Amino acid sequence: MRRQAAVAGAALAGIALLAGCTPAVPEPVAAPAAQESSAITQTQIDRIVPATFAELQAADKAKDPELLGERVQGAAVTVRGVQYELAAAGDKSAVEKIPEAQQAVYVSAEGVFPRIMVGVTEAPEDATPLVLLWEQTDIDADYALIDWAHMVPGATLPAMPGPAVGSNQLPLDSDAVDPTPRKVVRDYVKLLRQGPKSEFADEFAADTYRARLFAARKVLTAAAKKGDGSYVDTVQARVDETFAMATADGGALVFAPLVVTSSLRVKGGATVSISDADKALVKGKLKDRVTHTYRDLVVFHVPADGQGKPAVVAADHHLIKVAAQ
């Protein structure tokens, strides 16, 4: 008789950042009209947000990612498409609720492309607010929603310049903040790879995102050993898709996409098994190995010099692929 090794998969590694302590969202900092330098106006913002949600809601109703592509693009289409697959397979909670109402909207100042716009939603039921990321790739392109992440319970967003002025987008190597945005992402990825005893653990404030990844790693490693096998995960930063935006007090918000793969293998004739919800995504026939791939967004607050450690203020762990390989 063939043995089975149970894999917690998305149930364990999935990160649901539910409300327990509602994160704080400060009002944008006002500025005199004479200093206006924002890439877009409030009137334009008031058109972009409804247009985005009209497209998203139409696709949600039909559970059809083909209806996305003008105002919702990139990773957001990939993630939503997978959620539609899971919903079609019977997972009633697969499609995340993304409120249209925004508590605050932060925009880029005039400058280089691509430009970004950031929204912070009202809190959906039983969850924290979401941080939404729009991108405008060039002067002729529409702003499109490309990513989102729930705020970490108890997190506080920094004060940001209002839409009249906009926030400067920072190069990843900018010395306007210490550490630089690039170093923040690089060191945090090393921390995720090395685990809770990493030399970089003390460089960052504690956060639930990495705590849950580490907890899932521990459980899945134990599950693999029961099948005389092994578990390994990898973490890669998408540096070319990373943005940094200056805060009002001289710090930065850094928006860092990550790709996480979680691979479990068993031996001795055992067969891996996964949750019923994940089976809708399986490519291939399950045998002795299964790999889950996640497309995550981690949002860091890098305080102004000397005012604290970089902290994760929002993060989501989105399953996008399950492969039997």
Image (cartoon, helix red, strand yellow):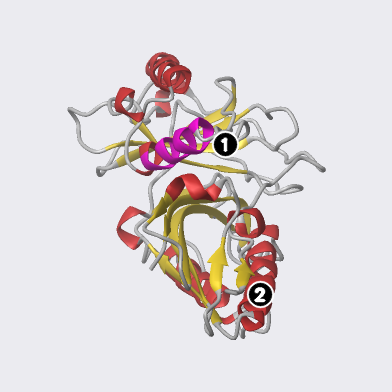
At which x and y percent is residue 33? Answer: 45, 21
Of tags 2 and 1, the one toward the viewer is 2
At which x and y percent is residue 289? Answer: 46, 71
Amino acid carrying label 1: it is: Ala
- Part of the protein shown in magenta: 78-88
For disc 1, the neighbor class at 10 Å (few under 14, some 14 to 19, many from 20) is some
The single residue placed furthest to the left in the displayed view is 140
Residue beneath the point at 17% across and 27% down: 140
Question: What residue would you read off at disc 2?
Answer: 223
Q: Is residue 138 above or below residue 302?
A: above
Residue 82 covered by magenta stretch: yes
Which image quadrant is residue 18 in? top right
Which image quadrant is residue 94 in? top right
At which x and y percent is residue 16? Answer: 67, 47
Which image quadrant is residue 113 in? top left
- Residue 199 in view here: yes
